[in-house]
Amino acid sequence: MQNVDYDLVIIGGGPAGMTAGLYAARARLNVILIERMSPGGQVLVTDWIENYPGFPEGLSGADLAMKMSEQAQRFGLEIEYDEVQSLDLKTDVKTVRLSGKTITTHAIILATGASPRKLGVPGEDMLIGRGISFCGTCDGPFYKDKIVAAVGGGDTAVQESVFLTKFAKKVILIHRRDELRATRILQERAFENDKIEILWDSIVTSVSGGLMNLDTVNVENVKTGETQKLGVDGCFIWVGIKPNAGFLDDAIKLDDYGFVITDQNMETSVPGVFAAGDGRMTPLRQIATAVGDGSIAAFKAEHYIENVNK
Ligand code: NAP
């Protein structure tokens, strides 16, 4: 048996990584979790969570993130704040390169999650942080009594549009089809909300503004070809997510969209490397599913490590 720095390295501190860390710490593995920012992942930028069981009144994303991190650390999980640069998975002893050092391990759990996708339209890059935002919780309060656009039709766009109405006097939700993708209860809240106007069958073709701020969102109706200039103070983009898998290179099998392919044991194409949460190819991306993934990944990693050490 070769010496390693850790039995298990967990990469990512969202719900999947924190749960894996909790289970691994309780299994008394020599485990470290690497997180590049603050624990919580996308949960941190979620205003209110009401579909995670056990919290009948709901709770804020920041609160849940903090509770998960506290719980895992209570059982001894070590957390290090650094960004993984690359992995070497060619041998049984795997190497994780951080910005300042390299660590070796028998097993890895990838829980690096996903990030918001951009629209890819002219003007977007220039105006990010100057009117274009991907985070309602962070930037919503800047739009008190203003008019904002929101783009997308999924859970994020609809839930966050409702949240924005706490501040904005009007939210124009721009969706490319004539039906929302979001879960029904979220749709009902949007339809009932007088401050939300939905622009159906419409896509954003470009955004523009001055040096310091966005002021116009140009949209086109995909059925009629009609175009219009929306005068708005901000534009929130919620058109899905992309996996945070850039550092993986070709080491692991990914699906066509870059999500890590696993089996039901969360094991990837490389023995001893597991994946959990939003960065994995999965039919449902929720906190509840990430937590389930994380616990299975830790359980299976524990078995893998036991066998390696025999
Ligand atoms: P999503 O479910 O993939 O929805 C993306 C939305 O953006 C879709 O409505 C899609 O339109 C639209 N879209 C995609 N590309 C576009 C483009 N280029 N231009 C215009 N519109 C575009 O993404 P999400 O809402 O970010 O959610 C991600 C995951 O997190 C999902 O699994 C979701 O269920 C989960 N989530 C859950 C909750 C909750 O449970 N409360 C909250 C937030 C997120 P089409 O519908 O036409 O494809």
Image: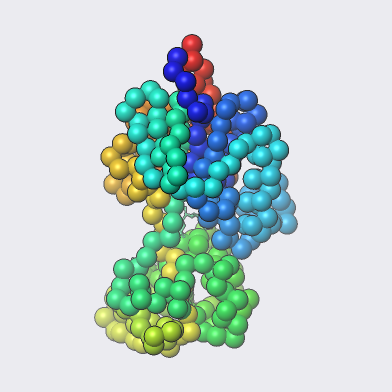
Q: Residue at x 43, y 37 (%)?
A: 102
View extreme (top): residue: 310
Q: Position of residue 174 (x, y in %)?
A: 42, 74
The residue lying toward the viewer, choosing from 171 and 124, is 124
Tell me if residue 217 comes above or below residue 297 in the rendering.
below
Instruction: Decide if residue 218 is on the left or right side of residue 308.
Output: left
Q: Quadrant of residue 152?
A: bottom left
Tell me if residue 195 comes above or below residue 266 in the rendering.
below
Q: Ligand 1 quadrant?
A: bottom left
Q: Position of residue 199 (x, y in %)?
A: 42, 78
Q: Position of residue 20 (x, y in %)?
A: 56, 36
Q: Position of residue 196 (x, y in %)?
A: 53, 78
Q: Where is the N terminus found, in terms of image quarters?
A: top left
Is residue 153 at least partly visible in the picture?
A: no
Q: Residue at x 54, y 83 (%)?
A: 170
Task: Please name the colour scheme applied to the rendered image.
Answer: rainbow
Q: Residue at x 31, y 68 (%)?
A: 120
Q: Residue at x 59, y 86 (%)?
A: 145
The residue lying toward the viewer, choosing from 104 and 290, is 104
Q: Quadrant of residue 218?
A: bottom left
Instruction: Decide if residue 219 is on the left or right side of residue 75.
Output: left
Is residue 150 at least partly visible in the picture?
A: yes
Tell me if residue 245 comes above or below residue 4 in the rendering.
below
The residue lying toward the viewer, choosing from 218 and 80, is 80
Instruction: Decide if residue 56 is on the left or right side of residue 244.
Output: right
